[in-house]
Amino acid sequence: MGMHSLAVVLAAVLLAGLPAFADAGKDKYEKVCASCHGMEGHADTKKGKKMKAADYREVAELSGPDALEHIKKTVRENKKHKPVSKKVSDEDLASIAQYVQAMLAAQK
């Protein structure tokens, strides 16, 4: 098998796992993020308004290639996220980042 064929097979295997990964991100988002950021990321919940949560539509980093790093840094370092930080692994944050990007793309 040539290098190109191997890359195609590997990509297909990885992509086959993405729907489950995205579902995990949606589930985790709903459990730990939605109470402040809302189901659509607009931060329009009572708790979100009180905490001055970010409206994801206004955070440019979430639509770009650095979304995961932005989410990791925010959740791990922003004191507003201290209770959430203890509830999520880096893998959880990766699936949440993927879900948030898909959610924002669907809103355009």
Image (tube, grey):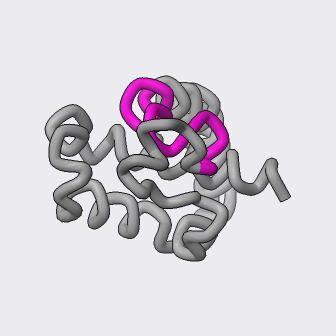
Q: Position of residue 25 (x, y in %)?
A: 49, 34
Residue furthest right in the image: 108
Q: Nearer the viewer, residue 108 or 9?
A: 108
Residue at 38% x, 60% y: name it: 71
Q: Does the magenta run of residues contain 35?
A: yes
User: Which segment did they paint magenta?
Assistant: 28-42
How many marks overall? 0
Whether residue 76 is visible to the viewer of this picture, yes or no, is yes
Whether residue 1 is visible to the viewer of this picture, yes or no, is no
Residue at 36% x, 51% y: name it: 51
Q: Position of residue 44 (x, y in %)?
A: 59, 44
Q: Position of residue 66 (x, y in %)?
A: 47, 73
Judge left or right: residue 34 versus residue 70: right
* Vertical relation: 50 (above or below) 64: above
Judge left or right: residue 105 versus residue 18: right
Q: Position of residue 37 (x, y in %)?
A: 50, 45
Residue at 17% x, 58% y: name it: 79
Q: Does the magenta run of residues contain 43?
A: no
Q: Nearer the viewer, residue 36 or 6?
A: 36
Q: For residue 22, what is the image quadrant?
A: top right
Q: Nearer the viewer, residue 44 or 22?
A: 44
Residue at 25% x, 50% y: name it: 81
Tell me the chief SS of the magenta region.
helix
Q: Which corner quadrant holds the C terminus?
A: bottom right
Judge left or right: residue 84 versus residue 21: left
Q: For residue 45, what is the image quadrant?
A: top right
